[in-house]
Image (spheres, rainbow, N blue to C red):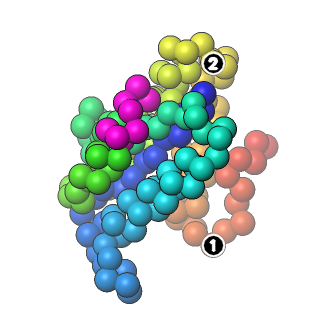
Amino acid sequence: MPILLFLIDTSASMNQRSHLGTTYLDTAKGAVETFMKLRARDPASRGDRYMLVTFEEPPYAIKAGWKENHATFMNELKNLQAEGLTTLGQSLRTAFDLLNLNRLVTGIDNYGQLLLINLRIRQDLFWSLATPFSNQRWFDME
């Protein structure tokens, strides 16, 4: 049973408009909707569970957990509003904590609990944001 977590930036900057006239948030919502429609065509997606997390402060960041149904997920996605600040670090932490919690509850591969990869992603994500054109590999475990 795969769990797909979508972390969406809902900070006020997502109200900016693209050259097409749509907001960045609407573009992000559309991308998730398109992914969901394409994924639904695959017979292997029958057991998929979806989570929706935003850049709001916890616990308000969790819009739909892995136990929510598809309709609840889509409704929460549709109702997202862009406001507040960008809390990238806290949002990533919330996303990883939710995935770790699910792994503990279900007993799936809880040996590493994403701790090593979690720390490495934070370092590389900061590096990638600071130097967007670098050739740094995200998962290069030196």
Q: Name the residue: 38% across, 33% down.
A: 69
Vertical placement of residue 135 versus 117, above or below: below
Name the amino acid, label 2. Answer: Ile
Residue extent of the magenta highlight: 65-73
Mark number for residue 94? none
Residue closest to the eye, 36 or 31: 36
Q: Position of residue 43 (x, y in %)?
A: 65, 41
| Quarter of the image where one finds residue 14 | bottom left
Name the amino acid, label 1. Answer: Phe
Considering the numbered disc 2 on the image, is that residue within a helix, a strand or a loop?
loop
Q: Is residue 26 left or right of residue 51?
A: left
Residue closest to the eye, 3 or 142: 3
Q: Position of residue 133 (x, y in %)?
A: 63, 72
Query: From the image, which quarter does the N terminus lie in?
Result: top right
Q: Would you name the residue on which mark 2 appears?
A: 108
Q: Residue furthest bottom?
A: 19
Vertical placement of residue 61 versus 130, above or below: above
Mark number for residue 133? 1
Residue closest to the eye, 35 or 92: 35
Numbered disc in front, either 2 or 1: 2
Q: Position of residue 53 (x, y in %)?
A: 37, 42
The reply to whether the magenta stretch includes residue 68 is yes
Query: From the image, which quarter does the C terminus lie in?
Result: top right
Mark 1 closeness class: few <14, some 14–19, many ≥20 residues within 10 Å:
few
CA separation in Å, label 2 and label 1: 36 Å
Q: Is residue 82 left or right of residue 134?
A: left
Specify which label sits upstream in the sequence, 2 or 1: 2
